[in-house]
Image: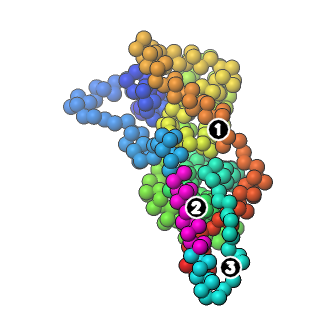
Amino acid sequence: MSATTDNINSSSISTAQETANTAKGVDGATDNSESKKGVDLKQLYEQSTQYNHWRYTQGALNDLRSGINQEAISSTKQNIEEERQQRIEQGLTVDDLPLDLKFLNVDEELALLGFYERRMVQIFRYWKLPAYAMATAIVYMKRFFLENTVMDYHPKDVMLTCMFLARKTENYLMTIEDFSNALKSPRESILNLEFLICKNLRFHFTVHHPYRPCLGFFYDMQAVTENVKRLQKVYETALKFIDTSLHTDLCFLYQPSQIALATIKMACKEESYDFERYASYKFKSTESAAQKYNETLLPILDVIESVLLEDPRCIDVEKSVATEIDKRLKMCKDPAKNPDSLM
């Protein structure tokens, strides 16, 4: 039997490990021979590249993005000036080189990324692929732009390559010819970025999402409900909250099981379902367990809920806003990235 939400109870509640995958628990897991030998068995999620390499604080994320943005602006300004000097020396026109650029700030970059993230959602739903395949593509793009800026790589190009990679990772293979034809994009523009994106992903292709632990909580909650139909509505609402979470930084800040449980809690509130009954059953079986839940896990769930209710990226980006940002983006291109440049 698989490890489940029972692992979030008592000793591991402080981190809400990624263990909510099935409805049954493994109460006798400590009796196996490996445990008797004193071997330290980490939870599966703790062994993942996601846990060990892609977790950040909000402050660290802000610093990363701000640093990349400022570095790109400085580099582009310098390269535009060098391009100007080279053209003047060769007697070429400099009329097309801007003098006073208004570069994109971090919030505008994130808004443009949010617009293309939602384009990915639309395309994956048109293909009728599972939500986790769509989520993998979105996370790939998010990870890429932690170390790059839209002023160097247009998100539409990155979006296409991330979608192509995600289909391969999640075993929904599509030839490059069929993929490029379906999206009416040159195959070269998709393949040219593939290795660069893989390198920026550190070749960490497996992504853990909240969908699976959310299903585990749904199964587990059936032990304390008489109305499975109502619980089904809670589960469906929670899935919508998980979809929304993809457009925030939650995947970098919290574990998938924590996000899943927070969305279940939010969905219970929206559907007038008694979440506390399940919380008492699962997390408050003893006084010490209840204390750990109240002091450690519950504050995490509340923070996740506040992000999903208050983060502006949870709201769709208007096409007119994205179009305006994109116009300015075209003026902010680094000449070093332009094959027709003298640089």
Q: Is residue 314 magenta?
A: no
Identify the residue shown where x is 67% and y is 40%.
312
As drawn, which residue projects farthest toward the right? 320
Q: Amino acid at mark 1?
A: Asp
Q: Position of residue 255 (x, y in %)?
A: 48, 37
Q: Amino acid at mark 2?
A: Ile
Q: CA distance from mark 3 to mark 2?
A: 20 Å
Report which residue position mark 1 lands on: 311
Report which residue position mark 2 lands on: 73
Tell me, yes or no, whether the two marked residues, 3 and 2, touch with CB atoms within 8 Å: no
Looking at the rendered image, the quarter that the N terminus falls into is top left
Identify the residue shown where x is 71% and y is 57%.
325
As drawn, which residue projects farthest toward the top? 287
Mark 3: which secondary structure? Answer: loop
Dividing the picture into quadrants, the one containing residue 278 is top right
Q: Is residue 68 magenta?
A: yes
Q: In the rendered structure, which segment of residues is drawn in magenta?
A: 66-81
Q: CA distance from mark 1 to mark 2?
A: 26 Å
Q: Position of residue 265 (x, y in %)?
A: 60, 25
* Label 1 CA crowd tier, 10 Å (few <14, some 14–19, many 20+): some
Of the numbered discs 3 and 2, the one sitting upstream in the chain is 2
Identify the residue shown where x is 45% and y is 30%.
16
Q: Nearer the viewer, residue 6 or 329?
A: 329
Report which residue position mark 3 lands on: 94
Main SS class of the magenta portion in the image: helix
Looking at the rendered image, the quarter that the C terminus falls into is bottom right
Of the numbered discs 1 and 2, the one sitting upstream in the chain is 2
Q: Position of residue 112 (x, y in %)?
A: 67, 54
Mark 1: which secondary structure? Answer: loop
* Label 3 CA crowd tier, 10 Å (few <14, some 14–19, many 20+): some
